[in-house]
Amino acid sequence: MKPITIKNVKTILTEPDNIRLVIVKIETSEPGLYGVGCATFTQRPTAVAAAIEDYLKPFILGKNVADIEDIWQSSYVSSYWRNGPVLNNALSGVDQALWDIKGKMANMPVYDLLGGRAREAAPVYVHASGNSVEEVGDRVESFIEKGFHHIRIQMATPGYATYGNGKSNIPQSEQAAPDKKNVLDGPIPTESFLREYKEGKTYTHPGGIFEPKPYMRSALSLFEYIRERFGYGLEILHDVHERIPPILGVWFAKEVEKYQLFFLEDLFSPEDNEYFKMVRNQTSTPIAMGELWNSPHEIIPMIKDRLIDFIRIHMSQVGGITPAKKITAMGELFNVRTAWHGPGDTSPVGHAANLMLDINAYNFGIQEAAIPGERTKEMFPGFPEIKNGMMWPNGKPGLGIDIDEEMAKKFPFKEREFGGAWDTVRRADGSMVKP
């Protein structure tokens, strides 16, 4: 039987709802047979597109679509240097598209190719944020009424930019100016910043001012309020987003233990992985980490030493389904559960790929969910349904999702200040804070 080969590789750049998405479409020598994959790195999307078009596409054209493992391994080392987010995301787009094709050839969902179902649907968590404990609480209540049982809670810290409260990526000029009245107990921003704010200039601190201790105290007050209002039957999660000094992170993990979080996320940056040993020795707060990891050399020790409880990998960031399924299997052996990264800048194709592993993996923990905009849902037919607090597969062959290419062309990338880089957040003295 003549093998089916890769005939063409397309890179589709689109922005239906203000998030830049990168989709790979592989066309085959079999008429009408193609696959789609997620290569979305929303802060550097055109770099990923160049990696696909200039390097991966000529390398894989003509290869047998059945040889996913060989294509992944040979592509992985074809640049010699590897494990960077640009090359990994490019490789992910190809890898996911090949799994989509293989599922269509077998007339099976990808989770069946991986060994079948371990569950019918994947419980998800959603994001509740606000500028006060009451506002967050009302948002939580609205999600509970819709059937969600796992909810990530984030709240603005008065006077400061705060990750996850809906304002962290809004320029400081659109936020309230910091002053002594609304700062909890931290330092006052520098005079130069206040002067720039009054003059409408925010180039020094485009992402706003952040201080660790005011943030931690406001977060603790939020946890206390949510537990008093809703009790301990609700599963709550929280994302530190690597912003606080490591030793304060150790203290914070101990302080939140009494609130029984489902997990505490991104307590440290990848550069500070060793601090997780201190946390594990001092508290039983469940820890989630991984969306910033690219390399197996970062991931393996954290699983092997049981320093995390949930692995939060962004699947395209590590190279797609092929490496993610191996990391999942390792996690099962060490009783580390999966919690794939799944915000809005995971494309709908990426969400569908996450779901394939969610359904198959015995050590699945939770899935982050993003509620798509109407244009996004229309552009990506087959977007997994979310109901009763769970994400449900549609049972279609492959990844079960597609992209409307003609519609995608109508929503090209918009120009962005600084190329769309993550806003710089700084301390009150002007020094940089990790995002």
Image (cartoon, grey):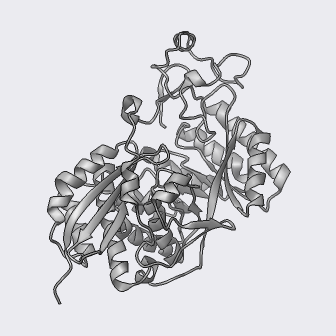
Q: Is residue 352 left or right of residue 262?
A: left
Where residue 72 appears, as percent x and y from the top left, is 26, 67
Q: Nearer the viewer, residue 133 or 349?
A: 349
Q: Is residue 294 visible?
A: no
In the foreground, 33 or 115: 33
For the point 23% across and 78% down, the residue is: 30
Residue 357 at x, y percent in the picture: 47, 72
The relative height of residue 404 versus residue 359 in the rendered view (above or below) is above
Please state the horizontal and vertical placement of residue 297, each as a whole percent of the image. 35, 58
Residue ID at (27%, 74%): 68
Q: In the displayed structure, does residue 105 sit left or right of residue 185?
A: left
Residue most toward the bottom?
1
For residue 407, what is the image quadrant? bottom left
Q: Residue at position x 65%, y 43% from top?
A: 252
Q: Position of residue 184 (x, y in %)?
A: 72, 26
Is 114 placed left or right of 289 in the picture? left
Q: Quadrant of residue 327?
A: bottom left
Image quadrant occupied by the N terminus: bottom left
Between 63 and 86, the one nearer to me in the picture: 63
